[in-house]
Image (tube, coloured by chain):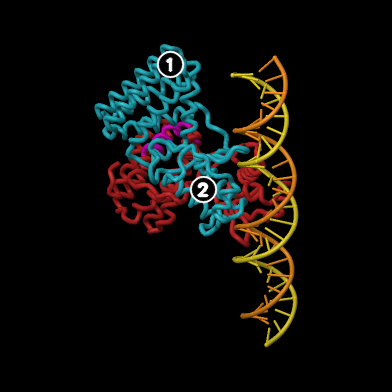
Chain colours: A red, B cyan, C orange, D yellow
Amino acid sequence: MLNKTLLPQSVAREIQTMIQTGTLKAGEKIPSQRDFAQKFGISRASLREALLTLETLGLIKTEAGRGTYISAPSAGNEGHSGHMAPWRYSDSYSVFDVFQTRILLEGEIARLSAGRLTQLQLEKMERATQTMADCWERQDLLANVEADLEFHAIIVSACSNSMLKALYQTVRDQVTETQRQPIPITDPKRMGESIAEHRRIIAALSANDANAARREMENHIRNTARCAGLSP
Amino acid sequence: MLNKTLLPQSVAREIQTMIQTGTLKAGEKIPSQRDFAQKFGISRASLREALLTLETLGLIKTEAGRGTYISAPSAGNEGHSGHMAPWRYSDSYSVFDVFQTRILLEGEIARLSAGRLTQLQLEKMERATQTMADCWERQDLLANVEADLEFHAIIVSACSNSMLKALYQTVRDQVTETQRQPIPITDPKRMGESIAEHRRIIAALSANDANAARREMENHIRNTARCAGLSP
DNA sequence: CGGTCTAACTGGTCAGACCAGTCAGGCCCA
DNA sequence: TGGGCCTGACTGGTCTGACCAGTTAGACCG
């Protein structure tokens, strides 16, 4: 069924390309299955199979009676970084395991990103860090988290290893959960340290010091885990 | 479409349960779509949608004219270890990226597995290594690779971090490809070294030396990459 | 102007037909 | 007797058309 020459498969790829190239944008509704099938010159049953594949993998969302919508992209999700959605029926992982995985993945990603970030990206990271500090002051926790996510996403986007990027996307949901959960119990001293750690990561990346970038990122995540009472 | 109350979806879950409980075993062929649909009391089109979902996520494999087979489970795939299949439509990753990812993942997995392998498992690894040597002598490359895969799979099965195990499964196909590809161009000296490296990994794991285990595994994979002309 | 109803739209499922690929068994020939 | 070829029965892949359930917009009435 998943043979690459199969009709639904090739149509799924076409639709994926339309999503990736922006022909179909996040939130947008695609034509009805009847119209879209006609447009591709295939039966509606085959189009449904193509759509189902895309939906299983999280690229689209179909609602009965309403239509099919393009799912919102994730920050840092550019090009062929994976759209590997987890099988939603399985249990989630322990927070310890997620943190341990974060330290491993993000440390290496930071190392591989060193020397590849543009000045513009580094400035965006600095701005995101400052935003974190500003939002923390006025207790805007949502914006604080979003700035944090943006900071990390920029680093991931520069990683030279597309496979690691894909793996990171696979676990993105669990990862961002660990970025959110310690926030309500973060004391002001820790947030100040966290922001300082961000700045040390930026400094290492700015200096194109791959090993320092890794070390600072691992340290940062390890300290975050300690806020959740863990020592991975 | 992926609403949990939908017919194909609930059937997909039933089939998943049958796979997880062992009613359907790895490699086993399920009944024909016509028979299976009748068995579930649904149309064949709906069963196809259920099967497509499972296949997109890597649990089954359907071959035209032959039938649908349960995918082989991976060693260590127990309970809620992820069924996170890679996105099969995207380009494959460069061999360099795969090797780099292997070094990162398998090094850490070896570290986390140290101290958790039973004597029986260590003996199986030693036997697999000896099998590699024996098969290499008689140029049975397939069996050589299978013994190599078994060696690595045992280590993965002992890893304490289920998320890392799941990530490893996600990239297993590409990983095993890098274990296969250098084989035809491996010279006897390198194979002897490879087997010696396996033994050093076993020794480190036997001594419950986590850092040595990581180091030896990284070294082993790095040397394998060199056989493919890469230096990750 | 707001509420209700209806028609046209949407996706979900079913049944049947036909096509292409696979495989096993039977038959024929060397 | 063994190997090769052919055929029929099986498999999945795709199409068509019908019908059902959910949604929405427009028209009509109070």
Please report the residue visible at 34 percent of the width from the left and 36 percent of the height from the top: B159
Is B3 placed left or right of B211 in the picture? Answer: right
Given the image, on which type of amino acid does mark 2 rest?
Answer: Ser
Q: Quadrant of the C terminus of chain B?
A: top left
Is B128 placed left or right of A63 in the picture? Answer: left
Q: Nearer the viewer, residue D2 or B76?
A: D2
Q: SS of the residue at dot 2?
A: loop
Residue C2 against residue B169 in the figure, above or below: below
Q: Nearer the viewer, residue A102 or B60?
A: B60
Range covered by the magenta-colored residues: A103-117
Place of residue B34 in the rendered image (x, y in percent of width and height, measured from the top left): 60, 48
Q: Nearer the viewer, residue B188 or B37?
A: B37
Please report the residue visible at 34 percent of the width from the left and 47 percent of the height from the top: A94
Quote the CA–CA distance across marks 2 and 1: 47 Å
Is B147 placed left or right of A65 in the picture? Answer: left
Given the image, on which type of amino acid does mark 1 rest?
Answer: Trp
Q: Chain of mark 1?
A: B
Give residue B136's mark.
1
Give residue B105's mark.
none
Residue bearing mark 2:
A74
Name the quadrant containing residue B167: top left
Q: Nearer the viewer, residue A98 or A190?
A: A98
Name the quadrant containing residue B83: top left
Please report the residue visible at 48 percent of the width from the left and 24 percent of the height from the top: B180
Q: SS of the residue at dot 1?
A: helix
- Asked whether A109 falls inside the magenta stretch, the response is yes
Place of residue A50 in the rendered image (x, y in percent of width and height, measured from the top left): 62, 47
- Asked whether B203 falls inside the magenta stretch, the response is no
